[in-house]
Image (tube, rainbow, N blue to C red):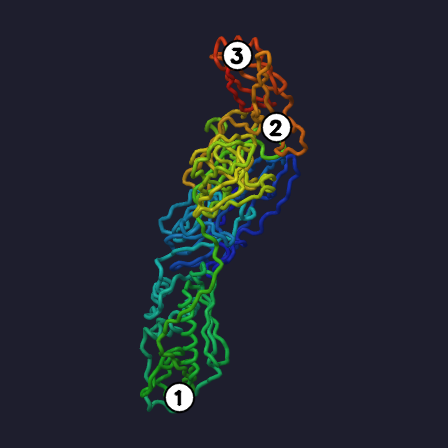
Amino acid sequence: MATLLLGAVGTLIGARVGGAVGTLVGQAIDQRLFPPKPREGPRLQDLRVQTSTYGSPIPRLYGRMRIAGTVIWATDLVESRSRRSGGKGRPATVSYSYSASFAVLLSARPVRAVHRIWADGNLLRGEAGDWKGETGFRLHLGGEDQPLDPLIAAAEEHAPAYRGAAYAVFEALALEPFGNRIPALTFEIEADAEPVAIATILADLAQDAVVPPEAAAPIGGYAASDGQLADLIETLAPLTGGPAIECGGRLAWPSAASPIATLAADEIAWSDEELDGNAAPAEAELAYFDPARDYLAGLQRARRPGRTGAAIRLALPAALSAGQAKTIAADALHRAESGSRSRSIRCGWRRIALPVGGLVAIAGEGGRWRVVRKTIDRDGVRLDLAQVAEAPRLPVTAAAGRALAAIDRPHGPTTVHLLDLPPLGDAPPPAPRLWIAAAGVSPGWRRASLLLSRDGGASWEPIGRTAPPAVIGTAASALPAAAVALVDRRHHVDVDLLHPDMVLGDADAARLLAGANLALLGDELLQFGRAEPLGGHRWRLSELLRGRRGTGAAGQAPGARFVLIDADALLAHDLPLVALGGTVRLLAAGPGDAQPAEAEANGVGAALRPLAPVQFRADRRADGGFDLRWIRCSRSGWLWRDGGDVPIAEEREAYALDLAIGDRVRRVEIGVPRFHYDAAALAADRLVAAAARLSVRQLGTHAASPPAELTLLLTEAS
């Protein structure tokens, strides 16, 4: 049953960029490994997720910021089970995958959009809006009329719409990439058009209690928490030129208010001025959030050469450029240096109303002074003053530094091939085995979910996800037919891979003998000794071994599929024996697919069929007949290790020989790789046709091999 965390929310992460959401969902639940029969993968024992902490405030966002947010609703984890054949004689594996649906509160005021999303520091959603993982997603912008989320409403009887607050809902987020737990999420959120003015932030938060500063530079973004107005104004002081003062019952900045009073010379009883050199800081540093570094925390410093003293340390939860941050630090250092000049004056009782923090001017002198302390005694009013810096803020250039940003490569659409191949290992499989190769036209493609149908699309079975990206392409030139017994040095073929990041390599004779550089081109398995890059994503393959695994080398046309046979990049899927000879359809859907990619295999079962016999020949006998002979092949092992016959890999040795004479076909089943076409039968057949079309197939345990064919002229012996 879903857990609803409505109303209060958890840990505030808005004012701290890059915070974790781990406290929102707690520790991942213990995993354990089930014993084989068949072997099973890690499986969670408890599907509940932990709740958020109550009572923490939610940030009000301005401009563009990266924040984490707070999980306010979540379902239990949903478990899915899939069974995959192991391939190459390995046992079948039962895999468990998990997904979760949950809602994350983002801002206590409306927003305009969500851009990038990070999960555990890696991009889950890219700049282009593409998803790197599998999930449904809905964003509620926080309008006062926003409706209930349909998923939450379906799960909860009394679900609020969170009007006035922005939140996001993830539906069935695949958790496998995150260790089967809800990951720590951070969001790049656009609340207002950037840059945003300080006056806009203060007007929204403080309303009529503040006179907005006139000269404050705009910023990229700001995350404000609910709290004391004075704390907020103190936080913004580096952007507004210094602290605010009380003026007519409202707070204002020196740039927006005239001095409260001008002290005449005749009302000053005495004055004592000094420069406190020890109070002047030598350095100011500002911590901020840098959009150029994916909104990670940055630090800029301003220094006074040759000076020693304390440092000013400021922290601002705002999105700033490096130059803005250094300018603010330099300005703070300058103002602190000016404030190190102080004076004390005594004046009459009529100045008793001057507020601490207010500004005064002294007749006949330039500049302004801030009241930092006021003492009232029987002799009048003593004012301790600090000079206010008047120099304008000059822009400073600075570098943001180098950031190790998360890789943002769009996933892109899926290309998938369903391969019905002879056995790739030494041991033939016990059932029809298909291989699935998938990749994308973009280097950012990772994986796709698979659905398989054996009844023409009437029903579909989920079979898990693809293997890592395979090297896939198409033939850019024709490859003529060739012999299979020798290295083909006469021909070459050019192939275009899906994208330039895919690469091929050379292989020497020893590596070729060990099976390296095996590829499927059209329906022919071949090996290549040399792969020459031609620029872009085109490669030229030469020094070819043709027709491997009994596939023949009849030649391939431009546009034929190309797949590098790499066991780590292919997914094996075994079918029941009843699927032998049938048609199988496949759908593959990844995060970048508007529609699933499709593939199809007809007459499946190449892994169970014996290979076609070879060296089919007819030798004339002295009596006028023919001795027909051929050599069988085996689908068990591909190396001739000891000079003897390889194992037959079938329950018995048997062949079907078809003799087509005119319109008639005569079939003979025999248990040896030879047949005596005697003179009497040949003479009778000669009366029907001038030639006989002969074909022989090896009869395997489950299926017959492709035919070996021969045309025999039925003329009398010369």
Element carrying mark 3: loop
From the top left corner, tell me how far across and down residue 320 is, in percent: 41, 64
The amino acid at mark 2 is Ser
Residue of label 3:
716
Is residue 141 at all visible to an observer of this figure?
A: yes
Q: Are marks 1 and 2 in contact (CB under 8 Å)?
A: no
Closest to the observer: 600 or 554?
554
- Residue 263: quarter of image: bottom left
Closest to the observer: 525 or 457?
525
Element carrying mark 2: loop
From the top left corner, tell me how far across and down residue 648 is, in percent: 64, 26
Residue of label 2:
634
Label 3 environment density (alpha carbons within 10 Å; few <14, some 14–19, many ≥20): few
Sequence-first tag of 1 and 2:
1
Element carrying mark 1: strand
The correct choice, above or below, for 190 with respect to 414 in the image is below
Residue 346, numbered label: 1
Left or right: 665 as drawn, with respect to 476: right
Distance from the alpha carbon under mark 3 to that under mark 1: 141 Å
Q: Give the foreground label among 1 and 2.
A: 2
Closest to the observer: 188 or 340?
188
- Residue 375: quarter of image: bottom left
The amino acid at mark 1 is Arg
The correct choice, above or below, for 346 with respect to 358 in the image is below
The correct choice, above or below, for 60 with respect to 255 in the image is above
The amino acid at mark 3 is Glu
Sequence-first tag of 2 and 3:
2
Q: Are marks 2 and 3 in contact (CB under 8 Å)?
A: no
